[in-house]
């Protein structure tokens, strides 16, 4: 070989010199350059160290002594040839002249053909050799030289190749980035211009371009180039798009949104090319980008397609896992929601088993709406009562429930004996349900079906020690360690013997929300823990929601705040009696003043008795407790007035009013199915929405019970509508002592109801009331129509003789009074007795509530107006019992602005023979002090000196006196021209004179000035006398009454005294004296 090829051109290489023994080596020299070999294939296993060295020496010698020298020699030869033919000004002009006219040649994809020996090919070879030997300047000059020739010859493929190499040369020279990018852009576009034949070259050019940009940290621009490389072939596009997404991730700052978007595009192209695993890989990478963002639509797209593709691969569990993420897609359209739910259910059915999903998003649970209602020593008659705030019940029951020292044997002592683990737990009773209200919402626009909704519970037994010491009961067989797990409700099996739980099925329309009440009833004693809720969606998927230990809950029935984790933990104690209560015939709506007879029914289904019952009502003004004797009375006939011999003696129940807690008779026991019935009276006092709260306290007959007492809480809502609006105005009569004019204004505020006004009663034994006009004149139509207003007047007379300052109006005294019937004459309807219960009881309540500035005034009067509806059925379509309406007006003052009233009493007409002697006439003045202070009164009389005989001169000067405020009306029946007026100052009448021509004079023959001191609330009589000299009609008003009040504090300090005084002109008093025969 050396003789043939030469001594220096041949060399011997010796390999595999390890004597057929496999040599273990850590590094494989061909590993970086060769891939795809199986792990069992071991390259170079027979090469020893000498073989490796000889191979290296051979290759180094071949490169340095043969290849590189040959290339250098070739470059020199080609450079000389190119310089001779193409370089220089003359050669360039010659080349341009020779190529002139080729630009008119039509383009062809292949372009003109160049032989290897042509000058164009030789220039290209020269440039490539120079590039390989890193002589980039020489390579660039030759590339530029040939680039113009290819462009003029329209050899676009070769022109694009030259531009590509120029771009790489510029990059290697690191001189001009813009020139390099311009060349790569020009080459890439030219490849694409060629068509499909240049697509592969365009891809290669783009990849070079991308690497150039990456090397300069221009990852964003590199991603754009990757995107441009994509073609119609799906797999090719998928790879390029995936690489573009990583460029966006590496850019500064990272462009995560575009990173995820291009991953999704890449995964979609992988799916089109049936590369499902690669599609899943890119989509799962995109999930990490969109997690925690608000980009709901793209997240739903990614999760849904991952689940869909996993289902294609038969990996159903992973498919279900991802499809669960798109169930609660509230932002999607109704069509997309139907598609997601349908595919999800189909995927679940393909698995052939039922999935249990923790925190299933369909439907959504509103944990903030969670309410727990249970009954320990507090029981509730209705769910409405259980929703009332505990503080309200607590304030109502504080007078009934025994204090802590007397209640040490109740359930509070039980809790104090428990270990600290259970000390803050709630207490419930065996056989009594614990109710949990929770809100379910359908976030979708399509209906869904929910079934088998129940609570997840655990009931475990308490140790023997706690049972014997604290609970005094057993829960059945136990393990040796003293604690055993009895059951778990996860499977909601009907075989559960320790407790029972309810199951609820319902459907939710689009966007619908419903409140579901779930119940669990323990059957044995122990520790009950409610851990969550379970449901089934469309009969295929089981949803589980565990109640978090630190979430906020609203619980009913706890006296103090508990740790949230213990709000759903209960100590179950043995069965106890429980009262059930209701009020029969209690209306939801009533008119103001409506009085009804109701019935309270209490039942005790337990075999153990309850005793020592108490009851308290929040609004005694509306609801009054009757006596057991009224149980079978007929209403309203039971309220009618009876003869003295028939009086039942049922007066106002003052004990119920003074004692806010009603005590049932001690012999009252409730047991079995026989209910305890007790009468109640309802009166709709004032319009508005009223909440009635009733609490019944009872104690256990079984002394071994853990709880000694329980309470039954009842709650009712009552809407009171306006009916009759009644008001009174009382004015004193100045000419009649202790008589008053009462004005009553009645307005029917209803829109459709009419009423019969039955009677008006003045409360109190010291009052007498009577009519001033016939009833037919007051009520022409015998009824008060809807919207009608009415005004009528009555005469009120005080029968009180004298009161001391210590006499007060007692609110607890029997309500005797005077009644006046307002029914037409001839009506035989009896009057109602206001002194008997319940009218008297409700009136006492009204006195307490109608507080006024003059409350407690002994001169005040109360009125009760009783009416009945025109028709029995005031609510159309509903058969109501008979109705009676009572309207109460309390503390109506009868006092005028002047506390002193008086009356002159004596004869009105006399006969006397004046030819024999004058006539002395005796009169008396009754003075009454209605104030609570001592009054000093002075009466000054003035004789008449005028020949007219009517008024004296001294009387004419009385206008200078300050006239006291005088109110009321005058009875002037003796003189026809005197009218009845109200609120008239008598001083204005001083100037009046009778139109009589001759009135003989008269004189006051008694003392001209009399002074008395009058005690509070007392009356006195003062004798008066006049002498008449001739017949005539005399006005005896020429006197003045001056009064002053003197009040002081108990200490008698003169500085604390305050004086109030006034002067009043005498009332007109006409006396007729005639000459006897």
Image (cartoon, rainbow, N blue to C red):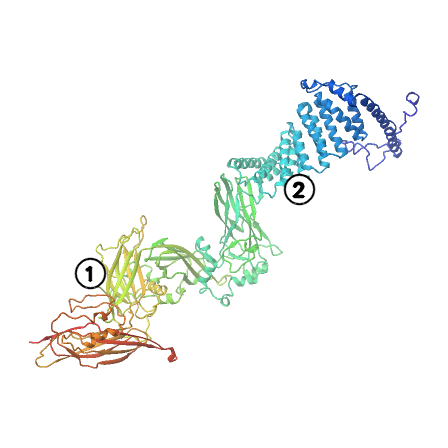
- In this view, the residue in front, 177 or 810, is 177
Q: Position of residue 743 (x, y in %)?
A: 26, 62
| Residue located farthest toward the left when viewing the structure as drawn | 1077
State if disc 2 and disc 1 touch (CB < 8 Å): no
**Lateral position of residue 372 relative to residue 773, left or right:** right
Q: Is residue 562 above or below residue 928?
A: above
Structural crowding at the residue carrying mark 1, measured as other residues with C-alpha within 10 Å and reported as few (<14), some (14–19) or many (≥20) = few
Identify the residue shown where x is 93% and y is 24%: 7
Q: Quadrant of residue 166?
A: top right
Q: Quadrant of residue 419?
A: bottom right
**Marked residue nearer the N-terminal end (1 or 2):** 2
Q: Which quadrant would residue 206 be assigned to in this image?
A: top right
**Residue 427 placement (x, y as % from top left):** 52, 57
Which residue is pictured at 71% across the width and 21% down the height? 152
Which residue carries the number 2 mark? 253
Q: Is residue 66 visible?
A: yes
Q: Secondary structure at mark 2?
A: loop
Q: Nearer the viewer, residue 367 or 122?
A: 122
Q: Is residue 261 above or below residue 628?
A: above
Q: Residues within 10 Å of mark 2 (few under 14, many from 20)?
A: few
Q: Quadrant of the C terminus?
A: bottom left
Q: Secondary structure at mark 1?
A: loop
Residue to which mark 1 is pinned: 774
Residue 521: image location, x then y, percent: 50, 52
**Mark whose residue sits in front, 1 or 2:** 2
Q: Which mark is residue 840?
A: none
- Locate residue 575 relative to residue 634 in the image: left or right: right
Percent position (x, y) of residue 485? 59, 52
If the image is split into quadrants, where does the N terminus sit?
Answer: top right
> Looking at this view, is 440 or 351 the one in front?
440
Whether residue 700 is visible to the viewer of this picture, yes or no, is no
């Amino acid at each position: 070989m050396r003789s043939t090829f030469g001594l220096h051109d041949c060399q011997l290489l010796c390999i595999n010199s390890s004597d057929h023994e496999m040599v273990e080596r850590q590094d494989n020299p061909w590993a970086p350059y060769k891939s795809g070999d199986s792990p069992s294939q071991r390259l170079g296993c027979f090469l020893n160290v000498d073989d490796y060295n000889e191979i290296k020496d051979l290759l180094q010698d071949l490169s340095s002594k043969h290849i590189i020298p040959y290339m250098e020699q070739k470059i020199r030869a080609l450079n000389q040839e190119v310089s001779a033919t193409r370089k220089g000004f003359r050669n360039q002009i010659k080349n341009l002249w020779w190529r002139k006219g080729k630009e008119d040649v039509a383009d062809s994809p292949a372009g003109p053909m160049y032989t290897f020996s042509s000058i164009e090919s030789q220039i290209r070879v020269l440039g490539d050799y120079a590039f390989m030997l890193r002589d980039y300047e020489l390579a660039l000059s030759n590339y530029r030289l040939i680039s113009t020739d290819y462009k003029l010859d329209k050899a676009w493929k070769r022109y694009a190749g030259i531009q590509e190499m120029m771009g790489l040369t510029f990059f290697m020279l690191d001189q001009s980035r813009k020139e390099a990018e311009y060349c790569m852009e020009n080459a890439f576009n030219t490849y694409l211009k060629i068509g499909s034949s240049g697509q592969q070259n365009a891809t290669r050019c783009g990849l070079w371009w991308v690497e150039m940009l990456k090397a300069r940290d221009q990852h964003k621009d590199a991603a754009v180039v990757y995107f441009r490389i994509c073609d119609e072939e799906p797999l090719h596009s998928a790879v390029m798009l995936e690489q573009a997404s990583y460029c966006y991730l590496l850019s500064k700052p990272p462009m995560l949104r575009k990173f995820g978007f291009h991953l999704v595009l890449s995964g979609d192209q992988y799916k089109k090319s049936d590369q499902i695993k690669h599609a899943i890989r890119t989509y799962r990478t995109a999930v990490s980008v969109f997690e925690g963002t608000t980009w709901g639509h793209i997240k739903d797209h990614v999760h849904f397609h991952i689940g869909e593709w996993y289902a294609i691969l038969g990996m159903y569990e992973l498919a279900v896992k991802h499809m669960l993420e798109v169930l609660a897609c509230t932002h999607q359209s109704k069509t997309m929601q139907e598609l997601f739910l349908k595919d999800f259910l189909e995927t679940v059915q393909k698995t052939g088993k039922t999935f249990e999903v923790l925190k299933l998003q369909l439907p959504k649970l509103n944990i903030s709406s969670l309410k727990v209602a249970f009954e320990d020593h507090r029981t509730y008659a209705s769910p409405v009562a259980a929703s009332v705030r505990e503080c309200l019940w607590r304030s109502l029951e504080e007078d009934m429930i025994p204090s802590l020292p007397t209640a040490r044997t109740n359930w509070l002592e039980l809790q104090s004996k428990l270990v600290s683990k259970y000390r803050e737990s709630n207490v419930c009773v065996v056989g009594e349900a614990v109710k949990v209200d929770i809100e379910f919402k359908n976030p979708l626009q399509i209906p869904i079906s929910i079934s088998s909704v129940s609570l997840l519970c655990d009931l475990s037994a308490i140790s023997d020690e706690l049972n014997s010491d604290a609970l005094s009961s057993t829960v059945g067989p136990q393990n040796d360690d003293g604690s055993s797990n009895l059951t778990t409700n996860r499977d909601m099996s009907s075989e559960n013997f320790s407790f029972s739980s309810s199951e609820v099925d319902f459907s939710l329309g689009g966007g619908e929300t419903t409140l579901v009440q779930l119940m669990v009833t323990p059957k044995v004693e122990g520790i009950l823990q409610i851990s969550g809720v379970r449901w089934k969606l469309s009969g295929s998927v089981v949803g589980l929601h565990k109640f978090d230990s630190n979430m906020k809950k609203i619980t009913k029935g706890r006296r103090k705040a508990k740790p949230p984790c213990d709000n759903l933990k209960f100590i179950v104690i043995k069965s106890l009696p429980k009262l059930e209560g209701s009020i029969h015939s209690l209306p939801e709506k009533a008119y103001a003043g409506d009085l009804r007879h109701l019935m309270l029914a209490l039942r005790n289904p337990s075999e153990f008795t309850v005793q020592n019952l108490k009851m308290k009502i929040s609004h005694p003004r509306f609801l009054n407790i009757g006596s057991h004797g009224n149980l079978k009375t007929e209403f309203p006939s039971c309220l009618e007035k009876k003869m003295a011999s028939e009086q039942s003696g049922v007066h106002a129940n003052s004990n119920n009013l003074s004692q806010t807690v009603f005590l049932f008779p001690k012999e009252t026991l409730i047991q079995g199915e026989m209910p305890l019935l007790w009468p109640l009276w309802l009166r709709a006092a004032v319009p508005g929405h009223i909440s009635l709260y009733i609490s019944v306290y009872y104690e256990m007959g079984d002394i071994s019970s853990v709880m000694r007492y329980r309470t039954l809480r009842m709650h009712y809502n009552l809407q009171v509508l306006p009916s009759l609006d009644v008001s009174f105005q009382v004015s004193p009569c100045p000419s009649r002592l202790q008589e008053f004019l009462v004005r009553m204004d009645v307005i029917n505020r209803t829109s459709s109801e009419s009423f019969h006004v039955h009677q008006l009663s003045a409360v109190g034994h010291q009052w007498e009331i009577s009519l001033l006009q016939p009833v037919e004149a007051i009520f022409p139509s015998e009824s008060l129509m809807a919207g009608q207003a009415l005004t009528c007047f009555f005469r009120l007379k005080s029968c009180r003789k004298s009161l001391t300052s210590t006499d007060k109006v007692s609110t607890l005294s029997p309500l005797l009074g005077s009644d006046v019937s307002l029914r037409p004459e001839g009506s035989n309807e009896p009057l109602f007795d206001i002194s008997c219960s319940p009218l008297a009881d409700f009136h006492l309540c009204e006195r307490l509530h109608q507080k006024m500035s003059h409350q407690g005034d002994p001169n005040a009067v109360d009125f009760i107006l009783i009416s009945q509806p025109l028709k029995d059925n005031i609510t159309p379509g509903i058969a109501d019992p008979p109705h009676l309406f009572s309207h109460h007006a309390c503390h109506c003052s009868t006092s005028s602005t002047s506390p002193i009233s008086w009356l002159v009493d004596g004869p009105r007409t006399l006969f006397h023979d004046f030819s024999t002697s004058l006539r002395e006439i005796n009169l008396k003045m009754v003075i009454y002090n209605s104030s609570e202070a001592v009054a000093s009164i002075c009466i000054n009389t003035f004789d008449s000196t005028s020949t007219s005989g009517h008024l004296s001169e001294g009387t004419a000067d009385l206008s200078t006196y300050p006239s006291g405020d005088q109110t009321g009306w005058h009875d002037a029946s003796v003189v026809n021209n005197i009218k009845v007026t109200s609120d008239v100052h008598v001083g204005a009448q001083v100037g009046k004179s009778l139109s009589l021509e001759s009135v003989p004079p008269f004189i006051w023959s008694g003392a001209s000035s009399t002074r008395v001191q009058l005690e509070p609330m007392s009356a006195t009589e003062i004798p008066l006398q006049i002498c008449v000299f001739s017949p005539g009609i005399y006005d005896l008003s020429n006197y003045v009454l001056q009064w002053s009040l003197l009040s002081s504090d108990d200490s008698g300090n003169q500085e604390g005294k305050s004086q109030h005084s006034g002067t009043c002109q005498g009332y007109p008093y006409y006396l007729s004296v005639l000459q006897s025969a």
